[in-house]
Amino acid sequence: MKIHSTAIVDRHAQLGHDVEIGPYACIGGEVSLGDHSIVQSHAVLEGAVNLGSDNFVGHGAIIGTWPQDLSFDPKTRSSVRIGARNVLREHVTIHRGTAEESATSIGDDNYLMAGAHLGHNCCIANKVIIANNCLLGGYVEVEDGAFLGGGCVFHQHMRVGRMAIAQGLSAFGKDIPPFVMAAERNYVFGLNVVGLRRSQFSAAERDEIKAAFKLLYLSGLNTSQVLAQAGEREWSSAARAFFDFVAAAKKRGICAYKRGEEQKATDGFLSALGER
């Protein structure tokens, strides 16, 4: 264990094996820090914060402080739960839950870049990348393998589906379905085809996901009609998850489809060549 002489570590904090804590870091009494984890200088971990093994907390990160909720009672017992092998870079902020016994949670193998902010009760799954200065409001849910581009903002209570990509400097208040590329303000522009290939989805699975996407966005049907039609046939597990996500959308619904001018030009060129 390596704890710098200027670090302030409460005697009640639970520290695992081979933990490293840098200069001027502050570790509160309710903090549990897993084996082989690193907390760099000036980071603050306070309140009921539980981190698993092999986590990295960068310079100036702040984890477990009060949520930015005007109705929050400081006596509320809430927490932050973080799994294993996560990287939380410089000045990341993660607030604890706002309701009694609730938590802000992060799974395993996630990478949060400098300045990312997770509001209270966010739920981040596994292998998610959140780029610099992303802002997530309270209760945002992000599924496995999603990528959130730099400077994006996400309204409270919205969801980001599995392996979705959000382009930098975009803003979202509606749910982003799995496997899509989203940008601007609540728009979807297509499927994350490269990501599907890299994740070793079979050709048949990719075709099913494309069919699901076309049924939802290109059929001219409304969401209820799409879900009814989707229920009439068998789908692969990934395509079925796509429709399950859509069915569970909340009042604000899902992002709409927008065909970009560049994509239109590309489609026209390929059509002329007989390649579409």
Image (cartoon, rainbow, N blue to C red):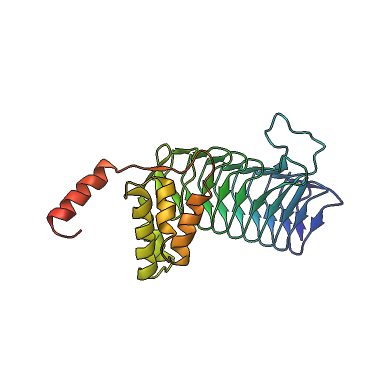
Task: In the rendered view, tell whether residue 239 sits above or below residue 155.
Answer: below
Farthest top residue in view: 70
Q: Position of residue 145 (x, y in %)?
A: 50, 57
Viewer-nearest residue: 199 or 208: 208
Image-based side of 33 in relation to 267, left or right: right
Q: Residue at x 32, y 46 (%)?
A: 220
Residue 236 appears in which quarter of the rendering?
A: bottom left
* Residue 6 visible in image: no
Q: Residue at x 43, y 54 (%)?
A: 228
Viewer-nearest residue: 241 or 141: 241
Q: Position of residue 163 (x, y in %)?
A: 47, 56
Task: In the rendered view, tell whether residue 85 sits above or below residue 75.
Answer: below
Image-based side of 227 in relation to 86, left or right: left
Image-based side of 174 in relation to 7, left or right: left
Image-based side of 259 in relation to 187, left or right: left
Viewer-nearest residue: 200 or 93: 200
* Residue 145 visible in image: yes
Farthest left residue in view: 272
Q: Is the N terminus in the top left, top right, bottom left or bottom right quadrant? A: bottom right
Q: Position of residue 218 (x, y in %)?
A: 32, 49
Q: Position of residue 240 (x, y in %)?
A: 47, 61
Q: Residue at x 42, y 69 (%)?
A: 200
Q: How many marks?
A: 0
Q: Is the C terminus in the top left, top right, bottom left or bottom right quadrant? A: bottom left
